[in-house]
Every structure is written in C-alpha cells, then in structure tokens.
Amino acid sequence: MTNGLILVAGQSTRLRGKCLLTVGGLTILDRAIKNLVPLVDNIILVVNNDFPVDEAEGYIKCCVGDTKSSGESLLRAGYLLTDGSYILEGDIVSDPLPVMKHGEWLAVSGADGSHLKLDKNGRVRGVRYVDTPYKSAGVIRVSEASAYLDRVDSDMSYDVGAIGYKLRLFSGKWVEVDTKDDLERARAIFG
C-alpha cells in the first residue's frame, strides 16, 4: 500500500491559506492531489487545527495540531508513512509528477531558495545551501519509512530525513507558492 502525504500543516505566515488558492482553475491542494492520484493508493492530508474540515472531501486527514516545523508535523503523522510513500509539500504547483523510485528526491534547477548539496554520486548530502544549482521540488519518495523518520528532527524541516537520497531532476513546470509574487508567477505559467 503506497501512501501520499501532502504537508499542509504549515502556518502560512507570508500567504494565509495558500493551498486553497486557485491556480489554473484548481486550488493548489486539488492540483497536488491530482498529481499524486496516479502514483499512490491513499492520499493523506497532514493538516493543522486551522484547516477547513470541509475541504478535500473523501481524503484522509491527519490533524497534527499546531506545530512549529514541517519536521514536527511529519513526526506526528509518521505512523502513516510507509516504505515507498510520497511526501509532497502542499504549496507546490507543478506539471504531473513522474513515477519515482524509492529513495529519490525531486529537484529543480535555477529556482530561488535553499538548495541541495550533492556528493559525487548525485546523492543529497545537505540542505539549505545557496551555492548549488539544485533546489528541492518539495517531493520525496521514501525508501525505508522508519529510517527516514529516525533522521527527522522536530525542530527542522521534514526533508532532512532524505539525506542520502538520489537526486532526480524535474524538467516540468514548477512553482513553490510562498508569497503573492509566487502566486502571480504560478498563475502566469499555469493559466
């Protein structure tokens, strides 16, 4: 059974309710769900106390309460993480996602933000770097769930659990929506 966890438990301090904003006729959340449906058996929304309960009817919702980081959110929902699960940030607008191998981390090239440091074999060795060309695309396919969760720290981002994963470059259209400018860029790209 393959689960797809969409992380929408953030505080959205720069752009409130961003996963429910519309881009190209779909909410950002609906687009994320649409992208995951062909890849997983179950879609699980990892939400906080502020998430409207009537949104995304028919999907499993795991309320993790108020959390201070995506790492803490994922640890609270960790019992739903299985080997081969997909983890997707809830503020990503993209073309359909590729089928990924276990232990792959999707990345984009040339985007703003913190970047991934790679070893000579193309495996992720660090996050939050500014001098590398690859930025996390906010999609990870977990290989071993328990080992992944063991590496996640509740004070940090969820993605540190994927240190050592193989980078896979995404060539489709992609935008991470954190600000109003990001939202306008996504709307210009996706209609």
Image (spheres, rainbow, N blue to C red):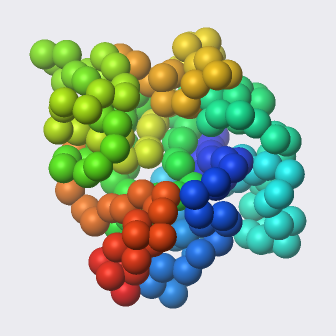
So how many labels did they put on this image? 0
86 on left or right of 50: left
- In the image, residue 118 lies at what x, y percent? 22, 22
**Looking at the rendering, which quadrant does residue 79 occupy?**
top right
For the question of whether residue 134 can be seen, the reply is yes
From this viewpoint, which residue is outermost toward the left?
120
Q: Is residue 79 left or right of residue 160?
A: right
Residue 170 in view of the camera: no
Residue drawn at (20%, 56%) of the image: 171
The x, y position of residue 152, in whole percent, is 59, 19
Residue 129 image point, x, y percent = 30, 27
Tell me which residue sits at (26%, 51%) in the image: 111
Q: Quadrant of residue 80?
A: top right
* Along the line of sight, the residue nearer the viewer: 4 or 163: 163
Which quarter shows the C terminus? bottom left
Residue 3 or 108: which is nearer the viewer? 108
Q: Which quarter of the rendering shows the N terminus?
A: top right
Position of 185 relative to 64 (above/below): below
Residue that appears at 59% across and 63% down:
15
Residue drawn where x is 85% and y is 72% of the image: 54
Query: What percent of the width, then of the height, locates residue 156?
Result: 58, 25
State whether residue 187 is above or below residue 109.
Answer: below
Residue 73 left/right relative to 48: left
Q: Nearer the viewer, residue 1 or 10?
A: 10
